[in-house]
Image: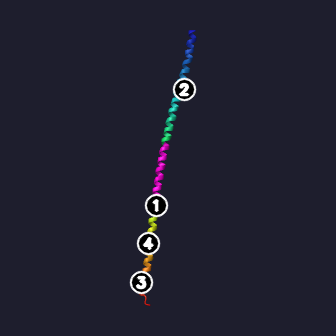
Amino acid sequence: MRDQEEQSLKEAKPVEKRAVEEAERLAKEQARKKAYLAREQAIEKDSKAKETKRTEKRAAEEIEQLAREQARREAYLAREKATAEAQEARRLKAKKQTPE
């Protein structure tokens, strides 16, 4: 009977050892998954922050571009107006100088 108990104990030890190893393996796998998910979330958060920053920068650049274009148009119109006024002034001056 004693031999049978010893045999049962010998057989139980590897089973217990495998159970402990399996539990450790599962715990390590769970920790790896948790770390992986944390890294992925950090990457996603960083990516979203960068995208938001790019969007804000693009919007600011568009506003600046529109302001530059408007200033360019206004300068062009002012030059055109000055040219037209100068031409009109020359025309009137020439008209006054020509004898009738």
* Disc 3 from disc 4: Cα separation: 21 Å
Q: Which residue is mark 1?
A: 65
- Looking at numbered disc 4 in the image, what kind of residue is underneath it? Arg
Q: Which residue is mark 3?
A: 93
Label 3 vs 4, first from the N-terminus: 4
**SS for dot 4:** helix
Q: Which residues are magenta?
A: 43-65
Label 2 vs 4, first from the N-terminus: 2
Q: Does the magenta stretch mainly form a helix, a strand or a loop?
A: helix
Q: Position of residue 23 (x, y in %)?
A: 53, 26
- Looking at numbered disc 2 in the image, what kind of residue is underneath it? Glu
**Residue 29 located left or right of residue 91:** right
Q: Which mark is residue 79?
A: 4
**Residue 76 located left or right of residue 1:** left
Q: Which mark is residue 22?
A: 2
Query: Are the residues at dot 3 and dot 1 in contact (C-beta closer than 8 Å)?
Result: no
Q: Where's the C terminus, which quadrant? A: bottom left
* Disc 2 from disc 4: Cα separation: 84 Å
Q: Is residue 45 magenta?
A: yes
Q: Position of residue 69 (x, y in %)?
A: 46, 64
The residue lying at 58 percent from left, 11 percent from top is 4
* Disc 2 from disc 1: Cα separation: 63 Å
Q: Residues within 10 Å of mark 1 (few under 14, many from 20)?
A: few
The residue lying at 43 percent from left, 77 percent from top is 85
- Looking at numbered disc 3 in the image, what kind of residue is underneath it? Lys
